[in-house]
Amino acid sequence: MDDEVMTPLSPDECWEMLREEEFARLAFRMVDEVHITPINYAVDHDTLLFRSAGGDKLLAVAMGSEVALEIDRFDEDHARSVVVRGSARILDEHEEHRAENLPLRPWVGTVKYNVVEITPRVVTGRAFRLSRPWLHMTLHE
Amino acid sequence: MDDEVMTPLSPDECWEMLREEEFARLAFRMVDEVHITPINYAVDHDTLLFRSAGGDKLLAVAMGSEVALEIDRFDEDHARSVVVRGSARILDEHEEHRAENLPLRPWVGTVKYNVVEITPRVVTGRAFRLSRPWLHMTLHE
């Protein structure tokens, strides 16, 4: 690996970016399949919360599977990505108030939501410097 | 589900967005774990190609696992997301030329790359209209 191209982010940098963003992608297993879906999340202390209207996401959580969540930022020449791996569970009704004061957007309008909590086990982040080699390749065309 | 909040994208719309974007998140299994990582990809006919410098991504492909890839776009009030699920394989040396004329950015500088091909089995897309209920909640504070 070339350290000038990829540098790891510190845990503090990872959590700062997690607090700043609101959209992530959640990856989870359904039996032998891997699924990925966008979610709107919010940091609540040292956990992440999101609302689920049911379906695949919720089923996977109900089955107690491990999940992975990714956020990222790109511009022309740089990228940063933070990945959280951990366990997910549906909050009990008496815990759902934890989501009430967080900026969580519903993805679906009118249905009843469950609130899912992700407890991170591993949080890693990387910053990349991107190159665009095809800009140079045009010299040979 | 409320159709006014979430609408499916047509296959053509999904492929159009896949051709327009260049960054995605790849989810894959490693034994019992789910991993997710950002990649730079390009569409090559009806497949997706990306370069891998080795490590987890490549190992997963070498093990023949199914993968899921997601791209998305957000603004204040709308989101769209396309998910590709399918199989991945490392291209043989005599096939690697397929990547040469595609705008694939390397994520790591100087190492030898492998080219990975994803053959989509399922391509789905959704458009969401986002609401921000906490803007209204402030009335009660």
Image (cartoon, coloured by chain):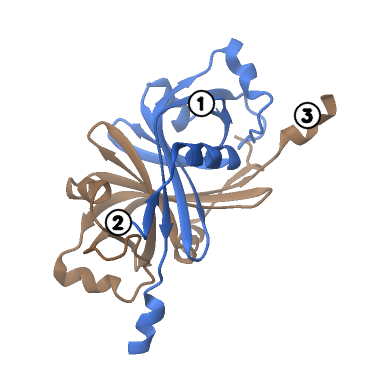
Chain colours: A blue, B brown
- Write the residue at 45% across / 65% down: B19
State left or right for residue B24 relative to residue A116.
left
Query: Foreground mark, 3 or 2?
Result: 3
* Label 3 crowd bin: few (<14), some (14–19), many (20+), radius 10 Å: few
Where residue B44 sits: x, y (%)?
A: 34, 68
Q: CA distance from mark 1 to mark 3?
A: 23 Å
Amino acid at dot 2:
Ile
* Most foreground residue, A108 or B109: B109
Secondary structure category for the residue under label 2: strand
Image height of B21 relative to A123, above or below: below
Amino acid, disc 1? Thr
- Image position of A36 with respect to B106: above or below: above
Q: Chain of mark 1?
A: A
Q: Quadrant of the C terminus of chain B?
A: top right
Q: Which of the pair B133/B82 is nearer the observer?
A: B133
Element assignment for label 3? helix
x, y (%) of residue B84?
39, 51
Relative image position of residue B86 (x, y in whole percent): 31, 49
Q: Considering only order in the chain, which callout, 2 or 3, is on the residue closer to the N terminus? A: 2
* Image position of A4 (left or right of A116): left
Q: Secondary structure at mark 1?
A: strand
Badge 1 is on which residue?
A47
Query: In the rendered image, which quarter is residue A23 located in?
Result: top right
Residue B121 visible to the viewer:
yes
The kind of residue tagged 3 is Met
State the residue position of label 3.
B137
In the picture as drawn, the residue positioned furthest to the top comes out as A94
The quadrant holding residue B52 is: bottom left
Please say whether residue A52 is visible from this viewpoint: no
